[in-house]
Amino acid sequence: GRERALGADHPQTLAARQATAHALGRLGRHAEAHQVYEAVLAVRERVMGPDHPDTLRCRHNLAFNLCRLGRPEESWRLAREVADARSRLLGPTHPDTLTTRYEVAYTLGRLGRWAEALETFQDVARARAGTLGADHPDTFAARYETGISLGRLGRDAEALELYRSLVADRTRTAGPADPETLRARHGLGVNLGRTGRWAEALAEAREVCALRERTLGPDHPDTVISRREVAAG
């Protein structure tokens, strides 16, 4: 195919191989994706240099995939290097820089370093609100993960207020039945329970479960989680 016609080092060949790795990752085939990313990265660094945007994109994807392979320490180190490089080349508030900083925060969480994860997610949420807008899905995603981090640190009342405002914003922009609105409502319900408001937590869990059954189907992972929580409630 493309490799034979254009050569192994051609940008289109590398782009196609990287797309293959991305698809493998989406299918959960992270070990295979890792092998392809490493091979493509070696060529990109040799041909384009370490600071080329395509090289940095490949390194970001490799870091993302490493975390899904259960190698968060390596993922964090690589993501931090890419975030620093992107910040230097593109600026600290460029969307690509913030995407990698989000990954840095995610890996910090996987490493149990929740205070650092919280600070980074908060920084990313603020920067995304400034550059992408307060209602951008990526801004909402960083706010959601901020809530997760607050919960992990035992700051349940703060997490509850964050999710309450996020549910309102998600509902306003995407509607009450959007999967991400329901994910925010799930976070709200969890933190209602953690703050001792059990009746409200159970009512929220039942509503979210019913909406997920209707919109996502009974076998969707989010629905299964909701059903389990209602049964335990």
Image (spheres, rainbow, N blue to C red):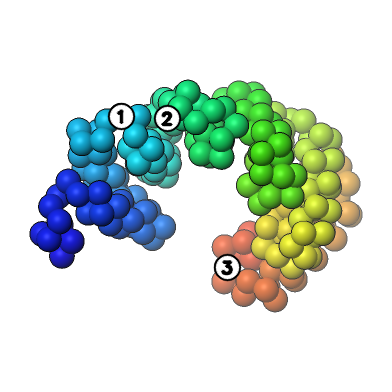
> Dot 1 surroundings within 10 Å: few (below 14), some, or many (20 or more)?
some
Q: Nearer the viewer, residue 77 or 139?
A: 139
Q: CA distance from mark 3 to mark 1?
A: 40 Å
In screen coordinates, is 140 left or right of 107?
Answer: right
Looking at the image, can residue 18 be seen? yes
- Identify the residue position indicated by label 1 in the image: 50
Identified at 13% across, 52% down, the residue is 7
**Helix, strand or loop status at disc 3:** loop
Identified at 67% across, 73% down, the residue is 215
Q: Which mark, by number, is residue 220?
A: 3
Amino acid found under the numbered disc labelled 3: His
Amino acid found under the numbered disc labelled 2: Val
Q: Which mark, by number, is residue 68?
A: none
In screen coordinates, is 126 left or right of 92?
Answer: right
- Identify the residue position indicated by label 2 in the image: 82
- Nearer to us of marks 1 and 2 is 1
Q: Nearer the viewer, residue 196 or 62?
A: 62
